[in-house]
Image (spheres, rainbow, N blue to C red):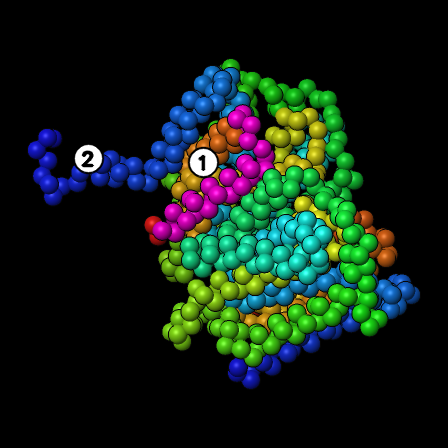
Amino acid sequence: MTAAPTSGPSLTGRLLSLLRGREILLALAVVILLNAIFTPNFATWRNVEITLIQMVFVALVATGMTLVIATGGIDLSVGAVMGLASVVAVALLPYGIFAVTLGCLTAGLAVGLFNGVLIVGFGVQPLLVTLGSLIWVRGLAQYLSGGRKEYFEDAAMRFLGTGRLWGLPLQVIIAALVVLVVAIVAAHTVFGRRLVAVGGNPAAARLAGVPAGRTVLVAYALCGLLAGLAGLFITARVGSSDPTNFGVLIELDAIAAAVVGGTVLAGGRARVMGAAVGALLLQLTTAAMIMNNIGFAVALVLKAALILCVVALQRGRA
Amino acid sequence: MTTSPATRLRLDARLVAAVVALILVLMIGAWRNPEFLGSENILNVLRQNAVLTLLAVGMTFVIISGGIDLSVGSILAFTSVVTVKLAPEGLPVAAAAAVLTGLGLGMVNGLLVARLRIAPFIATLVTLLALRGLTLAVFGEETVALTEGRSEVLAFGRGFVLGLPVQVPIIGVVLLAAWVVLTQTRFGRAVYAVGGSEESARLLGIDVAATRFAVYGLSGALAGLAGFLFAVRIGAGITNYGLGLELDAITAVALGGTLLSGGVGGVAGTAVGVLIVGFLFNLFNLDATLDTFLQKVVRGGLLTVVVVMQGTILARRRR
């Protein structure tokens, strides 16, 4: 050890190579450390729980976004889907929690399939299709509800929103399971390999016999589905629908989480667990800013700067 | 590039299609409402859509170069407040400040896209977000009303020149200048070349990065001018105005026949596209049959329909 040859990698070099591809864990450690020092009441179990609860929506949406970005696409309509799902949830509440769940997931799936069909079937750029959807889905949610929030009292929804299981918040458990399943699917199944192949080199993937269209379609469908689930969760948590405000700008957080987690915007890589860690990182940063009395406006600017830095770093490496 | 006769013919065909669509909207409007084609309503539509025209002209350059600029609405909101803050110094000062601020912000986009090589939609999405935050952080309140010399400013913003709203000659000059730059200058040809094929543009000796940088700077400057025109018409700067306006601008550009994949299109088509969008929403407002939420559905749906049509046309041509 002490007699390391001068031509070999130095200790710092070896440390760096160990960290390569895992920079996000380093960033996470730094954020946690800084928070532990500067933010009052940070290192408490209660705070850990609050952090996990607050990141559920972004984590779910970012999971779907990761799949879409892996194909080289993007989905800007996820936030609007959450608003639509909340309206659907309230409308179906008289028919019970299963109808509500089914309705929210179906609404998300429908928008996702709509996006996917236009992108795959008509060769339209994902950005433009989902930008259009962002507006019309939000408009539809507002039209169907007259733009009003609808408050409700429902035991099953309250349990889904704030209930606990094995001492942990129910939503955190479900979200963790979803992330885990999607991560395994993305990393260890044929679909996952196709996803990455389509995003990495569409022409080669098609030549290799990958059903490119179907794979991309499924990615958008899953992304919509997960956004629908996030819409159900936020509705249950808040105890009301909100067609106007639920999910606004969440697409940016989701993109940021996915990109910070190591998924490349150009496609060809899907890091679902990375996206979850990215969502955690964003949540901790946001919470730290709020707890240290940095305003929402400045927080927006800082978040934007963070996304830029990560994307610029990715470009530099490519 | 657009120099081959075949391409020019196709461009004209798209322009004709846009004009036909416009005439259709006008005919439906005239049928639904007798005042629709009255000079008062027409002048009103032109005045109200001056802002959109400026954004769409900038967007035309960006889209032809193969990019997209989602930040124009944010730049407009920011510069509308800049205008109000500087209006007491005189309107020329306020106008110059708004345009230069817009130019500076556009150059930030240009830097991110051209130098750091960040995907245009991510770069401009991030500036959209950061600028909304910045506007709130710097100016605080949501509406910054003009207090000093309000009547003079409004007299300009709501005034007439030779019987036309003051906005009409301004956007007329901008449209003409944009057309000349795009079709008659080396820079214009470079914009088409970069959007058509970056690789061949580079082989032709075109400075791709500089062209990109200039295009985003131009889009920002025009958004700054739009912010000025908005503020002098309303008599206030509104920090959260312009949300979704980039969508209308993209729709107008696409309706005008500029291909969203880059390399093909023009300012004349964009002018027609803006008129289609402007008269369509004017029709909804006059009719009052479509509530604001459904209008949103139509707005998003319109963009979707237009891009799908473009996609189908492109796919057919590739075959």
**Amino acid under disc 1:** Gly
The quadrant in which residue B162 appears is: bottom right
**Crowd rating for badge 1 (residues with CA inside 10 Å; few <14, some 14–19, many 20+):** many
Q: Position of residue B31 (x, y in %)?
A: 88, 66
Q: Main secondary structure of the magenta part?
A: helix
In the picture as drawn, the residue positioned furthest to the bottom comes out as B5
Q: Position of residue B314 (x, y in %)?
A: 56, 69
Magenta range: A290-316
**Crowd rating for badge 2 (residues with CA inside 10 Å; few <14, some 14–19, many 20+):** few
**Which residue is found at the position 65% from the left and 36% from the top?**
A246
Residue B86 seen in this snapshot? yes
**Which residue is found at the position 66% from the left and 24% from the top?**
A157
- First in sequence: mark 1 vs mark 2: 2
**Amino acid under disc 2:** Leu
- Is A232 rendered above or below residue B203? above
**Residue A11 marker:** 2
Q: Position of residue B100 (x, y in %)?
A: 59, 58
Look at the numbered discs 1 and 2 and tell me whether their residues touch, using CB distance below 8 Å.
Answer: no
- Is B57 rendered above or below residue A52? below
The quadrant in which residue B118 appears is: bottom left
User: Which residue in the protein does label 1 denote?
Assistant: A278
